[in-house]
Amino acid sequence: MKKYFLSLAAMSLLLVGGGCTDTDTYDYSTHEVPVGISISVTDTVKAVVGDSVQVIVTIDNQSGDDQVLHSIDIGDSYLEGINITSSVPMYSEAYSIPDGTTSHTLLVDVAKGATETVTFTGLASSVGSWTGAFYVCFEDGVTCEYFDVSTLVE
């Protein structure tokens, strides 16, 4: 019985020490995108319920090295009123992460000297001013640049 409690205590210490809580948030600002990468994000400013809306991301890679666009994370507060229906290129999976965003895995190669565009299409589903975080992430998904997206739905 004593071994059981010691094992349980050790496992608890490992989990707590490893930062495994469901309320952790990740500080993306400590992981900057590579020098030479420029990103612009354009969103639909105004829509009516039922309208199609878009968020267009343009990535210009002048870094001198090929890069991988890992994922784009969209704030859940934006997704409360805008339902993402597709992207071009299409994301392979979408899942919720504890920082209040939904991550869309893309794994798009961005060759050195090239410009790539990703277009998210959604449906304006609820009246309101929908604003949220928008992270464009490279490499392993934690090297990100932060933007805000916002759409007024009437």
Image (spheres, helix red, strand yellow):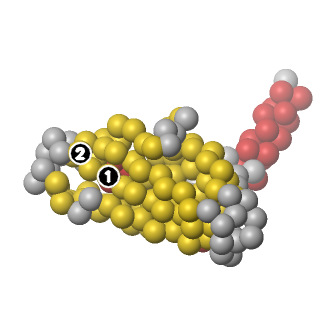
Q: Quadrant of residue 9?
A: top right
Mark 1 Cα shell of 10 Å, populated few (<14), some (14-19), many (≥20): many
Residue found at the very far bottom of the displayed protein: 35
Q: Residue at x 57, y 67 (%)?
A: 60
Q: Position of residue 71 (x, y in %)?
A: 57, 50
Q: Position of residue 140 (x, y in %)?
A: 70, 52
- Asked if residue 3 is positioned above or below residue 115 in the image, the reply reads above
Q: Residue at x 79, y 45 (%)?
A: 14
Question: 60 or 43: which is nearer to us?
Answer: 60
The amino acid pointed to by label 1 is Gln
Report the disc number at residue 54.
Answer: 1
Q: Quadrant of residue 26?
A: bottom right
- Asked if residue 92 is positioned above or below residue 107 in the image, the reply reads above
Look at the numbered discs 1 and 2 and tell me whether their residues touch, using CB distance below 8 Å.
Answer: yes
Q: Which residue is mark 2?
A: 52
Report the disc number at residue 22.
Answer: none
Give the Cα distance between marks 1 and 2: 7 Å
Answer with left or right where residue 86 lies relative to residue 152.
Answer: right
Mark 2 Cα shell of 10 Å, populated few (<14), some (14-19), many (≥20): some
Question: 57 or 96: which is nearer to us?
Answer: 57
Question: 129 or 4: which is nearer to us?
Answer: 129
Answer with left or right where residue 89 lies relative to residue 47.
Answer: right
> Which quadrant: the N terminus?
top right
